[in-house]
């Protein structure tokens, strides 16, 4: 009975962590923001989510098949990318554009660079920016949230748009709850924070990137206020636009963020700094996507200069 | 206290904590390898047909870095030949058919120790090796190279591997023996003080030893947070003294010698009785074992008979590991013998033995956070895969202590430490003249 014993090199036990469990946790953490998006922007938002997720998964399957690589649907990363893409798009985007976005995210940015773990920029954010360049008008038409006076007005403005173009700024409570114009899943700070806390508790992400990123934006937006030093409105800046979803879900993407704590701190500060520069000193109302994408490309450089301190490498002997 | 960075918390599985040691008795055969230590192999001192008694020298070497081996039974030598052991290399072994009488060799008597030199030669004659795992000859360890000044004897009772409780049982069952052994070592080597480090998941052991040393100022007991690999030499020295042993250096270079609790107590027992190292307490556990327990086993006993003593298997033993699940060595046959430094034998069922399929690295950095040596396991894995050994050496592949934390933590189930072993081996073979 014991004639044949398996041989293997130690360790002989593994933790129960797995890629698919991590991705499932991210999907769960995105649930509040997804529900908030559907609540505020209606069933069309739900359709956008479904189209993005289904097309991302389909592109992942087809790309792996055509490239003759193993099937990776079960790691759930394509579903996560699809959902993140949907949450970063206008709720009422034409669905074929959403499919184009999924194609860029999954096929061009992820699979052509080698698949999971190999892409050098965040697939969902990269796709969003490509869509923004290609279809600028449709990508900046914001659905008015539920209860907004103009009923189903399509030409609502985001808080940052109002800030740039002028007009009446929304209240903090509406911004906190998500009752403002914006991308499908970015408007409800409350829902995003709940998801972020879930990821922290499950140890899927560490606190450094979201807290330092948001903290940097708060600090700089206060210091660099419109009326001179220390006159800014940090609360407005952290609740507005894509900062919450960017800091909690996009900047924390494993593949495109640094490997060490020190690196993560530098990266988060860089994201915050660039976000403020884009928001305050360019023609664009929002800069989170660009800030994260630029910092994504700086990650190899950051990693090279923030290696962990090696044991015994000090002056001891 | 200094806490090392990284590490992991595997489920402790210390199921045998409360199980008193049971002596197994004489097996049907013993196979005693001539190499059970790091260093030169011994030459057999007996031949086929010889009768031997318990404690009789059966193998020795002229080399300094070596440890003699003794018969654990009385009986007749039936074979002296090369046997392939779990290192996959043939090792000269002496096979003895026990007569069951366990007659003690006539020349066994307490050694005369009156100086450092006579102490060290007594330790050598006892066949003692580090009983914690690596099996380094004790007399070599206790005689640090010229130019080093050792001020601290570190006694390792951390026992951070899951399952294993054999050192814990030593702390409970032979508390005074440990203290006595430490005092002998301090006395004859001239080291000023000893520090005993035990993980805080073993409060009874900490209590027992603290009481035993309460009026001995030169020995202190320290509770360490339970975290694997707290009991690795480097992390233990760091926790107790704050000193870091660099890659390629010895503990003696930072003024320390590390000894396992069971090694220490054996010193006392040998000086008292003169009986060499012929038996060992072994934790028998794992999902396939019927009655997990701590067993006192004669060295050379086939693994099969040890498991049979524990009621056999309750399910098919798919994998048998000598040592703990994090760093133990899988065995290819149940006919292989128990060695001097065997502290545990684990029989794992099919589910527990399954090696999960690896997938692409997702750069989650769990391996980086888990590495107690501050390395980049994912990067070393990648470089070895690409055969870029020089680059791997530049980012300190040789610092890896092979604790396995990276692989344990990895969600993509990558075989990082396994790659690193291949890389280290390649580099060693290609840098030796």
Image: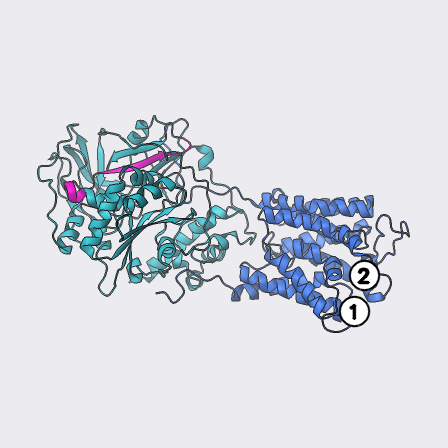
Chain colours: A blue, B cyan
Q: Is residue B279 magenta?
A: yes
In the image, residue A241 above or below residue A68: below
Q: Residue furthest bottom?
A: A228
- Quadrant assignment, res A165: bottom right
Label 1 or label 2, whichever lies nearer to me, is 1
Q: Residue furthest right?
A: A150
- Residue receiving disc 2: A136
The stretch in magenta equals: B270-288
- Residue receiving disc 1: A283
Q: State left or right for residue B198 relative to residue A254.
A: left
- The image shows residue A303 at horizontal and vertical percentages of 54, 63
In the image, residue A317 above or below residue B159: below
What chain does badge 1 belong to? A
Res. B431 mark? none
What chain does badge 2 belong to? A
Q: State left or right for residue A22 relative to residue B263.
A: right
- Quadrant assignment, res B174: top left
Q: Is residue A309 magenta?
A: no
């Amino acid at each position: 009975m014991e004639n044949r014993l398996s041989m293997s090199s130690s360790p002989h036990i593994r933790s129960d962590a797995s890629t698919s469990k991590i991705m499932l946790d991210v999907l769960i953490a995105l649930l509040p923001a997804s529900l908030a998006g559907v609540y505020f922007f209606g069933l069309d938002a739900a359709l956008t989510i479904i189209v993005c997720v289904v097309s991302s998964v389909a592109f992942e399957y087809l790309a792996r098949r055509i490239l003759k690589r193993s099937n990776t649907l079960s790691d759930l990363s394509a579903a996560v990318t699809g959902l993140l893409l949907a949450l970063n798009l206008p709720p009422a985007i034409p669905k074929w554009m959403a499919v184009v976005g999924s194609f860029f995210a999954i096929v061009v940015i992820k699979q052509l660079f080698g698949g999971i773990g190999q892409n050098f920029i965040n697939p969902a954010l990269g796709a969003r920016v490509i869509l923004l360049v290609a279809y600028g008008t449709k990508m900046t038409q914001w659905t008015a949230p539920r209860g907004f006076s103009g009923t189903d007005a399509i030409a609502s403005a985001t808080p940052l748009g109002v800030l740039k173009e002028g007009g009446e700024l929304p209240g903090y409570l509406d911004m906190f709850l998500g009752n403002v114009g914006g991308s499908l899943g970015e408007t409800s700070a409350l829902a995003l924070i709940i998801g972020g806390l879930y990821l922290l508790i499950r140890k899927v992400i560490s606190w450094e990137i979201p807290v330092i990123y948001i903290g940097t934006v708060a600090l700089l937006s206060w210091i660099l206020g419109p009326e001179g030093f220390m006159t800014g409105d940090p609360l407005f800046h952290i609740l507005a636009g894509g900062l919450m979803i960017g800091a909690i879900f996009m900047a924390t993407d494993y593949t495109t963020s640094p490997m060490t704590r020190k690196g993560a701190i530098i990266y988060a500060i860089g994201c915050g700094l660039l976000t403020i520069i884009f928001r305050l000193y360019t023609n664009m109302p929002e800069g989170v996507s660009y800030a994260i994408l630029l910092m994504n490309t700086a990650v190899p450089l950051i990693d090279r200069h923030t290696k962990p301190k090696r044991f015994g490498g000090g002056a001891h002997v | 206290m200094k806490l090392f960075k990284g590490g992991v918390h595997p489920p402790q599985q210390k199921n045998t904590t409360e199980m008193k040691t049971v002596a197994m008795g004489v097996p049907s055969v013993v196979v005693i390898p001539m190499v059970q230590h790091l260093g030169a192999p011994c030459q057999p001192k007996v031949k086929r047909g010889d009768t031997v008694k318990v404690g009789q020298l059966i193998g020795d070497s002229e080399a300094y870095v070596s440890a003699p081996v003794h018969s654990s039974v009385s009986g007749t030598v039936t074979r002296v030949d090369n046997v392939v052991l779990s290192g996959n290399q043939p090792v000269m072994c002496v096979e003895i058919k026990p007569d069951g009488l366990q007659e003690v060799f006539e020349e066994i008597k307490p050694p005369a120790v009156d100086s450092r030199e006579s102490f060290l030669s007594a330790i050598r004659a006892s066949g003692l090796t580090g009983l914690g795992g690596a099996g380094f000859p004790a007399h070599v360890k206790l005689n640090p190279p010229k130019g080093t000044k050792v001020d601290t004897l570190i006694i390792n009772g951390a026992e951070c591997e899951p399952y294993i409780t054999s050192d814990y049982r030593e702390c409970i069952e032979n508390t005074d023996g440990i203290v006595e052994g430490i005092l002998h070592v301090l006395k004859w080597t001239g080291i000023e003080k000893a520090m005993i480090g035990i993980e805080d998941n073993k409060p009874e052991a900490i209590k027992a030893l603290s009481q035993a040393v309460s009026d001995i100022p030169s020995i202190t007991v320290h509770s360490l947070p339970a975290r694997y690999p707290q009991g690795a030499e480097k992390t233990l020295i760091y926790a107790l003294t704050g000193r870091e042993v660099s890659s390629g250096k010895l503990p003696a270079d930072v003024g320390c010698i590390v000894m396992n609790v069971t090694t220490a107590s054996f010193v006392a027992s040998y000086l008292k009785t003169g009986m060499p190292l012929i038996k060992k307490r072994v934790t028998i556990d794992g999902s396939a074992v019927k009655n997990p327990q701590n067993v006192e086993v004669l060295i050379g006993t086939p693994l099969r008979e040890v498991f049979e003593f524990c009621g056999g298997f309750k399910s098919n033993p798919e994998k048998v590991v000598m040592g703990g699940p994090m760093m133990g060595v899988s065995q290819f046959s149940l006919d292989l013998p128990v060695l001097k430094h065997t502290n545990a034998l684990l029989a794992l069922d099919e589910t527990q033995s399954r090696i999960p399929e690896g997938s692409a690295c997702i750069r989650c950095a769990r391996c980086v956070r888990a590495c107690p040596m501050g390395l980049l396991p994912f990067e070393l894995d990648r470089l070895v895969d690409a055969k870029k050994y020089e680059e791997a050496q530049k980012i300190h592949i040789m610092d890896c202590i092979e604790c396995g934390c990276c692989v344990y933590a990895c969600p993509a189930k990558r075989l990082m430490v396994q790659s690193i072993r291949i890389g280290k081996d390649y580099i060693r073979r290609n840098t030796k003249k």
